[in-house]
Image (cartoon, helix red, strand yellow):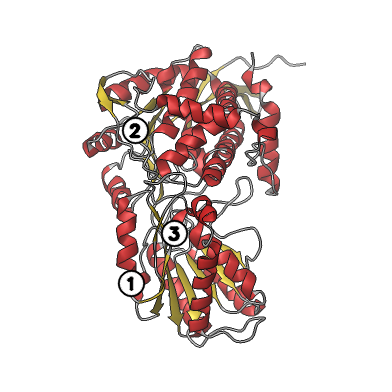
């Protein structure tokens, strides 16, 4: 079966969507049984349940034991035991699998990956239940972000990889006239060759959404991949790897092209990152380890998304109530544990003009706190929107944030109706002044927001520029009825190279991005040096190796 032709329509649809940047997704985000099948959700949950407390069915070279590091934020006893393998064995197996994958060619590789991706989609309920249990995401968010939206980003990376590789012809006949003498004629061949072993290091909160782009971009361009998931969110990555290995084996390819790396010893990951065979590293996580990679894995190209200070500026609004509702949801979704969630809300200290009259700084803060409180007043909404806190350290940050200024909204420990052991806390909101720069100028990951009284709208712009230049951000939002001031914010976004959202009051939120339309991060500020997805994210993952030789000149007609 020619898998490339089987899935050609899917690839063509993705390429068309990338060219137009309108709304498009081949993977429905509606988890309805009418879409995925009457028993799909139950089957997926049962498949995950069958793995709990067991050895995960994955055999890889160099296994020295089994580890079970995951602790569910919902308090569920997971106990899945994964293989721990020697780094040198993983590297050797990856390199051994590379020539066969390379020989398959661009079309062959793309076909295999599209087949694997469609199988992942069919197992969305299984993968996303694993996402929910390991990350603390609410059920619907886990399904959408962990399943269809992550699959969208994978397909986006595959499509861009194809676009980059398709620009390279396989061969050419070079014929250079020499006047009265016979022409110089050469046959030239151009081989797309991956740079080498790719290491993809996942994060604790989005183990598919942030892993799939680098995983599929590296594979599509001819590289073997070792996936090192966060130790608290292994299962979604393991299932995804198993699907890829299954398709590879069916096609007569070496399944060790894709491997799982896991150990409780940080030196294990460090050894992989510094291995001379590792040519690229995709990383989502802390600044501390990101900088370690920059300093110590210099042989590898690093595609990194780290911490930033996401900001919203409120200059004025003609939809005050809708603005508050939009921001309340933004601050509450998945307990603020998204790399795109707003942290700093900058408001002129003398207040703002609204459709409900002038609102003082104090009133804006109080009203926003009340909007969050109202949103989360229903226990069913709490569980669906907040989910659970991924790490105990995040709970500690909530308490630390409350000590920095005047508390507008105190955080409360909450009870989850289905998971009594879940780590759930409502957001904390703190009022600060522009002079409290050290308190709000670095990331405070989690359900923490600072409402900052600035010296007018100009002071808010200057404050945003300072934090964006120093720490970067993935998102910037503004609310204003003044088009001239809004244009200044547009220029600020350009200068600091951060994505801008203007006057969001409907069902789109600053911390959400849509594949095939939105670029996730720009790659142009300290928060991230790459973007999901541009050609730059894929095009440097391969090289073109040419060979040429003289041939006889074509016979004259």
Q: Which residue is mark 1?
A: 439
Q: Is residue 375 above or below residue 285?
A: below
Q: Which residue is mark 2?
A: 278
Task: Report if the CB atoms under discs 3 and 1 are less than 8 Å apart.
Answer: no
Q: Is residue 202 above or below residue 384?
A: above
* Residue found 49% across the figure and 56% down from its top: 340
Secondary structure type for disc 2: strand
Place of residue 436 in the rendered image (x, y in percent of width and height, measured from the top left): 34, 78
Secondary structure type for disc 1: helix
How dense is the environment of label 1, judged by Cα within 10 Å: few (below 14), some, or many (20 and up)?
some
Secondary structure type for disc 3: loop
* Quadrant of the rendering where the C terminus is positioned: top right
On the question of residue 217 being in view, the answer is no
Q: Of the numbered discs in the image, which one, if any, rests on residue 525?
A: 3
Of badges 2 and 1, the one in the foreground is 1
**410 left or right of 511 in image:** left
Spatial separation of the CA atoms under disc 2 and disc 1: 39 Å
> Quarter-wise, where is residue 67 in the image?
top left
Residue situated furthest top in the rendering = 252
In this orientation, which residue lies closer to the viewer: 406 or 260?
Answer: 406
* Residue found 38% across the figure and 48% down from its top: 390
Q: Earlier in the sequence, mark 3 or mark 2?
A: 2
* Quadrant of the rendering where the N terminus is positioned: top right
On the question of residue 74 being in view, the answer is yes
Spatial separation of the CA atoms under disc 3 and disc 1: 21 Å
* Residue found 52% across the figure and 13% down from its top: 250
Of badges 3 and 1, the one in the foreground is 1
Q: Earlier in the sequence, mark 3 or mark 1?
A: 1
**153 left or right of 180 in image:** left
* Residue found 29% across the figure and 48% down from its top: 289
């Amino acid at each position: 079966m020619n898998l490339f032709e089987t899935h050609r329509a899917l690839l063509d649809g993705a390429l068309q969507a990338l060219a137009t940047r309108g709304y498009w997704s081949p993977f429905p985000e509606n988890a309805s049984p009418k879409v995925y099948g009457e028993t799909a959700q139950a089957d997926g949950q049962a498949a995950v349940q069958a793995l709990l407390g067991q050895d995960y069915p994955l055999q890889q070279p160099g296994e020295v034991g089994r580890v079970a590091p995951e602790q569910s934020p919902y308090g569920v006893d997971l106990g899945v035991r994964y293989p721990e393998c020697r780094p040198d064995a993983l590297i050797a197996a990856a390199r051994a699998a590379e020539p066969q994958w390379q020989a398959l060619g661009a079309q062959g590789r793309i076909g295999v990956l599209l087949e694997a991706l469609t199988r992942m989609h069919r197992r969305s309920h299984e993968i996303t239940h694993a996402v929910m249990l390991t990350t603390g995401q609410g059920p619907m968010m886990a399904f959408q972000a962990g399943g269809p939206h992550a699959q969208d980003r994978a397909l986006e990376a595959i499509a861009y990889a194809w676009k980059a590789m398709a620009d390279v012809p396989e061969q050419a006949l070079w014929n250079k006239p020499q006047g009265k003498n016979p022409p110089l004629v050469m046959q030239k061949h151009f081989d797309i060759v991956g740079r080498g072993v790719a290491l993809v290091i996942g994060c604790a909160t989005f183990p598919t959404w942030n892993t799939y782009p680098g995983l599929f971009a590296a594979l599509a361009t001819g590289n073997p991949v070792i996936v090192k998931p966060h130790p608290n969110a292994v299962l979604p990555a393991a299932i995804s790897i198993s699907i890829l290995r299954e398709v590879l084996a069916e096609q007569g390819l070496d399944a060790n092209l894709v491997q799982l790396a896991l150990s409780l010893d940080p030196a294990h990951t460090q050894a992989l990152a510094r291995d001379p065979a590792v040519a690229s590293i995709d990383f989502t996580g802390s600044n501390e380890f990101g900088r370690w990679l920059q300093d110590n894995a210099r042989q590898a190209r690093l595609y990194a998304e780290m911490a930033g200070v996401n900001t919203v500026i409120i200059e004025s609004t003609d939809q005050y109530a809708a603005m508050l509702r939009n921001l309340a949801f933004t601050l509450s979704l998945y307990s603020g544990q998204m790399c795109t969630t707003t942290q700093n809300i900058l408001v002129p200290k003398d207040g703002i003009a609204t459709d409900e009259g002038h609102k003082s700084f104090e009133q804006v803060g109080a009203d926003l706190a009340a909007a969050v409180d109202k949103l989360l007043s229903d226990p069913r909404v709490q569980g669906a929107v907040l989910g659970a806190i991924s790490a105990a350290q995040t709970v500690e940050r909530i308490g630390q944030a409350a000590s920095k200024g005047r508390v507008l909204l105190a955080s409360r420990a909450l009870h989850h109706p289905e998971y009594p052991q879940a780590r759930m806390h409502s957001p904390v909101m703190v009022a600060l002044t522009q002079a409290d720069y050290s308190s709000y100028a670095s990331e405070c990951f989690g359900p923490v927001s600072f409402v900052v009284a600035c010296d007018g709208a100009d002071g808010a712009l200057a404050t945003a520029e300072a934090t964006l230049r120093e720490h970067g951000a993935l998102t910037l939002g503004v609310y204003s009825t003044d088009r001239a001031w809004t244009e200044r914010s547009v220029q600020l976004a350009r200068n600091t190279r951060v994505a801008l959202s203007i006057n969001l009051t409907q069902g789109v939120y600053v911390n959400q991005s849509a594949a095939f339309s939105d670029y996730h991060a720009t790659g142009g500020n300290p928060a991230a040096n790459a973007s999901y997805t541009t050609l730059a994210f894929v095009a440097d993952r391969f090289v073109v190796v040419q060979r040429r030789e003289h041939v006889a000149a074509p016979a004259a007609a």
